[in-house]
């Protein structure tokens, strides 16, 4: 019940971001669909972003990262978007050539 | 007197230019190189003209004083104003109580053209030493050479076209055909003329040696001119190798001179000393016969010091400074010299130089090469092996005369006497026309040596000149005969006078000249005078040294034999009935180009002993100017107690009268005997041959010298060579083979090691890397999800490790 | 007010309630993304999860970032993803199921990772406690987005108020990074368009 009455601390955010990160990793590790893997990446990035924002929030810490945390998070969002665009283009290309988006099939470079 | 070196130097170098031209362009000079003959002849004739000019220059500078007569050519010369120095010399002679006649000393023109190298105070140069002897030699050599160059146009004309050598049979049974070598012949002749003139003009003994070897090589080339004939190439080799023996002795003499005198130069020479001042340094002659010693022979300082080098080293060690030591040595050196130290080295030097002369002048025991050298073309025999090169030995003895001690002169006399007698006996029985002349040459050279050894410098050198003329003439005549008959064998000739009158007459003149014919005590041919000089000198010598008197008798016997074999030759060739019809029919008189030189030489043979009308000019008087200072008075040997008589003693009228009589009688005896055997056939030569069968056998086998040398030197040399070859094949080759095999084994071992260990190591490294790569390849699965898993594991591991090593407290630090 | 009825209970802290709501939503849908096998459902769950994260951004005081999250991810990236899903539709008989073993493996590793990360998140005592009331910042009058904009243009307006901290890196902003990102985006868009353009297969031509 304390959770409802007390203001939350930094650790809570960190736990949430850790869970999101772990879910993303699990998603990447278990999905055979290329798009699924991409979604996992989005989750991981989102978790990391949450971390930055939490550390930059003045409400959670007296000496926060301040504006830097938000700024980095902003860049990460932009880069994640760019990454998603390129990754989708690659996925389309891969689909064009192999008629599938199964990452397990994409092992032509194995030793 | 700068003109003389210029004139003679030009005369010397002209044949070299001709040689170079022919060498480069010879085969392109006219048809078959005919132009080469003109080039060479032009060069030698020009040299002759220059020599004649030099002679007139010399005579105008040093006119010949009117002699009181043959008998006392030098007796009164002291009256004619002599320089103060010579007067002083004459005075000292007089005070010494000797019967003396001071000669006017004519200084030689000596100097250097070019310095080849200097070693401290010692140096080697190209220089000149010109005195009356040099001028006369130049005149004689260029004249005879000119005649022979002209003569060769006729004699060698076969060489202008294709030549068929009938003496060479090929394996196919045919005779050898080859291209003519006309230009080659003249090329060698030019080189020879250059070398001979260089030998004569040379200003130092080293230069003499160089040209000595050059004439040797020319002789080698020309003897082997018909190189395809086995006999010719053998003869060339023999001449060259036998000469090497003599030259070895000469090198020893050269070393003695260089060590003992510190110079090779004949005359005094200028040289900058350490302070840069020009100082005169004494040459060989000045050192052996210093003016301060009245030109008497003494051991040079260097030789004395060399003989006493141990004592000198002791003095230098004991004394405080160098100057002091030098002073002490100077003080003692005369005492040492009196005790005879250094004299031995002088003898060594003299004998060494004479060794070279023995080889070159074909003296006993190295005379064996000259008869064989007749394989060369006859003009070559005339020029090189009669007139000039072989006389170079006599010339060198004459040139080096001041340095020869009485003991060396005695050796020279003995060698000359033996040579003269042996060669004359060989000539008595030889049937090859050129060989008779060759033996005669050896014999006459022996005469010259004998004369020089007797102390008759003038006699020996004078005979050199007269002999050059008449022996060249005789050879050219024989060449003319050979050219006409194509044979050398006298028994196949006979009666040729009708067919070849000019040749016959000129050859008769030559025979008379060499025999020394003349009207006794009034006039004669050149040989008459020169042989008289020798016999007279021998007479005086015999008088002075009764112990060595037999030398004189042998020389007299030689004169008789000379006359005999020369007329035998002439009778057998030109008189009598033709013995070979075929030869006789083919014989013909030679072309004018061959006859003109014959006539010129015949004239020279007649007149070269005469005085030029209305002047005092005569050859002996000219040569008298060159008599080395201090040798006129004879000498006494301190070691063996014998005397070298003064030469002017032989010119005393009594002695001369007697000598002329003996010489003429001997010549007449020889002539009569020859006429009896071969002219009128009153006596049968075969009878004599049977009677003296043993002697005949010895003579015809040339005293078995060749056989002896074959046994003593050639066979052992061949045997030793055989052993060494065997050793080489079985010993050294074995070592070489086995070391090679050992090397092969080592190489194989190394190869094995390389393959088994070094290569293996490298292979192992490569294979290991390869296997590692193969193993690591498995890690590259290509499975994306696996990579993610690994990433996660890595991340977890990273956190674990950080947790392990890093704690919160540390972050606060 | 309701607080009066429960005097022993402190009043409900609404920001905490909202935090719990958004956090649970985000985590739950993230787990749903992992668990579900249908790609379309995955996309839908992801949208919800990311939206919840945007809510968390709002709660942390990053309004502009939350908005950007909603716009870029939910609005842009997810539409892109759905397009991708539709364009790469699988044939009916293609199975892309992951094997059980792999699932177990992944879960093991992921759980280990989660334990570690959560333990690390709670290890610092200061992070566990909420910020004391007296340190709470006074709500700024300037809007957050304006500050971000100025920061991107190279001016750190928030530093004007406090004395410059030498360890904080001075007043420099993010202009260069902004420019780089802009160009990067351009390149990426062109590159993506190039890569994804419709190409005929060679054997078709």
Image (cartoon, rainbow, N blue to C red):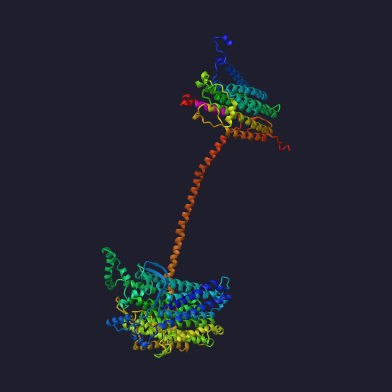
- Quarter of the image with the C terminus of chain C in it: top right
Q: Is residue B709 magenta?
A: no
Q: Nearer the viewer, residue B579 or C178?
A: C178
Q: Is residue C200 above or below residue B33?
A: above
* Residue B426 x, y percent position in the rendering: 43, 80
Q: Is residue B262 above or below residue B42?
A: above
Residue interval drawn in magenta: B790-802
Residue at 55 percent of width and 38 percent of height: B770
- Residue B424 appears in view: no
| Residue B33 seen by the camera | yes
Q: Is residue B793 magenta?
A: yes
Residue B542 location (% of width, % of height) = 33, 83
Compare residues B667 and A67 and report the one nearer the observer: A67
Instruction: Residue at the far right: name it.
Output: C205
Disc tally is 0
Residue B639 rendering spot, x and y as whole percentages: 30, 75
How would you classify the magenta stretch by its main secondary structure?
Answer: helix
Please state the horizontal and vertical placement of residue B85, each as a whole percent of the image: 32, 80
In the rendered structure, the answer to whether residue B654 lies left or right of residue B8 reads left
Q: Quadrant of the N terminus of chain C?
A: top right
Instruction: Report the side of B366 relative to A63 (left or right).
Output: left
Name the residue: 55% across, 11% down: C9
Where on the picture, by quarter, is residue C44?
top right
């Amino acid at each position: 019940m304390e959770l409802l009455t007390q203001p939350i601390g930094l650790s809570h955010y960190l736990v949430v971001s850790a869970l999101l990160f772990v879910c993303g990793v699990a998603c990447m590790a278990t999905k055979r669909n290329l798009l699924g893997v991409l979604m996992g990446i989005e989750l991981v990035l989102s978790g990391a972003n949450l971390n930055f924002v939490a550390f930059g929030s003045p409400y959670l810490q007296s000496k926060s990262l301040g504006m830097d945390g938000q700024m980095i998070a902003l860049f990460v969002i932009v880069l994640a978007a760019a990454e998603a665009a390129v990754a989708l283009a690659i996925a389309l290309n891969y689909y064009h050539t192999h008629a599938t988006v199964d990452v397990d099939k994409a092992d032509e470079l194995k030793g | 007197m700068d003109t003389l070196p210029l004139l003679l130097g030009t005369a010397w170098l002209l044949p070299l230019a001709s040689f170079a031209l022919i060498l480069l362009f010879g085969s392109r000079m006219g048809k078959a190189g005919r132009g080469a003959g003109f080039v060479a002849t032009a060069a030698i004739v020009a040299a002759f003209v220059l020599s004649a000019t030099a002679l007139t220059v010399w005579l105008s500078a040093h006119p010949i004083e009117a002699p009181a007569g043959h008998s006392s050519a030098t007796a009164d010369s002291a009256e004619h104003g002599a320089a103060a120095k010579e007067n002083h010399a004459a005075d000292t002679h007089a005070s010494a109580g000797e019967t003396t006649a001071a000669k006017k000393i004519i200084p030689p023109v000596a100097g250097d053209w070019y310095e080849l190298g200097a070693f401290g105070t010692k140096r080697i140069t190209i220089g000149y030493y010109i005195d009356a002897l040099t001028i006369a030699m130049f005149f004689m050599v260029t004249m005879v050479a000119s005649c022979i160059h002209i003569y060769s146009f006729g004699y060698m004309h076969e060489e202008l076209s294709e030549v068929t050598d009938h003496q060479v049979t090929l394996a196919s049974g045919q005779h050898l055909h080859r291209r003519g070598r006309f230009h080659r012949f003249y090329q060698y002749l030019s080189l020879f003329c250059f070398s001979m003139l260089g030998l004569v003009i040379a200003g130092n003994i080293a230069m003499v040696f160089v040209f000595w070897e050059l004439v040797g090589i020319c002789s080698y080339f020309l003897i082997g001119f018909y190189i395809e004939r086995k006999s010719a190439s053998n003869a060339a080799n023999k001449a060259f190798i036998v000469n090497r023996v003599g030259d070895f002795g000469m090198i020893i003499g050269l070393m003695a001179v260089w060590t003992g005198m510190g110079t090779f130069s004949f005359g005094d020479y200028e040289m900058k000393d350490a302070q840069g001042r020009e100082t005169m340094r004494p040459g060989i002659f000045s050192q052996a016969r210093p003016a301060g010693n009245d030109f008497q022979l003494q051991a040079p300082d260097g030789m004395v010091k060399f003989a006493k080098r141990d004592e000198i080293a002791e003095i230098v060690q004991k004394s405080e400074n160098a100057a002091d030591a030098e002073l002490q040595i100077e003080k003692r050196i005369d005492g040492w010299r009196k005790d005879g130290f250094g004299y031995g080295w002088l003898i060594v030097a003299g004998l060494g130089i004479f060794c070279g002369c023995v080889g070159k002048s074909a003296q006993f025991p190295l005379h064996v090469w000259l008869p064989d050298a007749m394989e060369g073309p006859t003009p070559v025999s005339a020029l090189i092996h009669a007139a000039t090169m072989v006389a170079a030995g006599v010339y060198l003895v004459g040139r080096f005369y001041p340095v020869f001690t009485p003991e060396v002169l005695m050796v020279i006399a003995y060698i000359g006497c033996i040579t003269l007698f042996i060669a004359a006996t060989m000539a008595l029985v030889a049937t090859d026309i050129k060989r008779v002349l060759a033996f005669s040459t050896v014999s006459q050279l022996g005469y010259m040596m004998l004369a020089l050894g007797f102390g008759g410098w003038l006699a020996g050198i004078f005979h050199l000149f007269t002999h050059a003329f008449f022996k060249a003439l005789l050879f050219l005549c024989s060449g003319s005969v050979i050219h006409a008959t194509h044979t050398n064998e006298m028994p196949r000739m006979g009666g040729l006078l009708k067919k070849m009158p000019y040749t016959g007459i000129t050859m008769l003149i030559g025979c008379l000249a060499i025999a020394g014919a003349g009207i006794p005590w009034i006039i004669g041919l050149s040989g008459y005078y020169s042989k008289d000089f020798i016999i007279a000198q021998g007479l005086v010598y015999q008088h002075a040294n009764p112990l060595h008197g037999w030398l004189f008798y042998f020389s007299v016997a030689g004169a008789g034999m000379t006359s005999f074999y020369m007329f035998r030759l002439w009778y057998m060739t030109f008189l009598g009935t033709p013995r070979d019809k075929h030869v006789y029919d083919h014989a013909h008189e030679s072309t004018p180009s061959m006859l003109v030189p014959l006539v010129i030489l015949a004239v020279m043979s007649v007149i070269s002993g005469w005085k030029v009308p209305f002047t005092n000019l005569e050859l002996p008087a000219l040569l008298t100017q060159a008599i080395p200072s201090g040798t006129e008075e004879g000498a006494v040997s301190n070691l063996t107690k014998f005397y070298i008589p003064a030469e002017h003693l032989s010119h005393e009228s009594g002695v001369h009268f007697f000598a002329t009589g003996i010489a003429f009688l001997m010549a007449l005896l020889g002539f009569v005997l020859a006429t009896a055997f071969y002219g009128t056939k009153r006596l049968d030569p075969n009878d004599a041959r049977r009677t003296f069968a043993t002697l005949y056998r010895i003579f015809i086998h040339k005293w078995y010298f060749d056989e002896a040398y074959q046994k003593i030197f050639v066979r052992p040399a061949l045997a030793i060579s055989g052993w060494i070859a065997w050793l080489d094949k079985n010993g050294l080759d074995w070592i070489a083979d086995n070391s090679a095999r050992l090397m092969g084994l080592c190489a194989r071992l190394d190869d094995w090691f390389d393959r088994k260990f070094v290569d293996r190591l490298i292979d192992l490294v490569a294979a290991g890397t390869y296997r590692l790569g193969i193993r690591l390849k498995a890690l590259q699965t290509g499975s994306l999800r696996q990579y993610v898993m690994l990433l996660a594991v890595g991340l977890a591991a990273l956190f674990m490790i950080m947790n392990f090593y890093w704690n919160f407290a540390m972050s606060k630090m | 007010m309701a607080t009066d009825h429960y005097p022993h209970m402190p009043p409900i802290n609404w920001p905490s309630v909202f935090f719990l709501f958004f956090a649970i939503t985000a985590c739950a849908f993230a787990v749903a993304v992992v668990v579900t096998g249908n790609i379309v459902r995955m996309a839908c769950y992801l949208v919800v999860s990311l939206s919840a994260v945007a809510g968390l951004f709002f709660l942390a005081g990053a309004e502009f970032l939350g908005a950007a999250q909603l716009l870029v991810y939910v609005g842009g990236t997810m539409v892109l993803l759905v397009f991708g899903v539709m364009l790469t539709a699988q044939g009916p008989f293609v199975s892309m199921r992951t094997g059980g073993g792999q699932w177990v493996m992944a879960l093991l590793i992921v759980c280990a990772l989660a334990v570690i990360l959560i333990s690390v998140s709670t290890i610092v005592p200061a992070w566990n406690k909420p910020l004391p009331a007296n340190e709470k910042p006074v709500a700024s009058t300037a809007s957050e987005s304006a500050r971000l904009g100025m920061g991107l243009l190279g001016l750190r307006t928030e530093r004007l108020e406090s004395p410059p901290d030498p360890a904080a890196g001075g007043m420099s902003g993010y202009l260069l990074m902004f420019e780089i990102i802009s160009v990067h985006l351009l390149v990426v868009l062109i590159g993506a368009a190039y890569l994804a353009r419709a190409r005929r297969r060679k054997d078709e031509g």
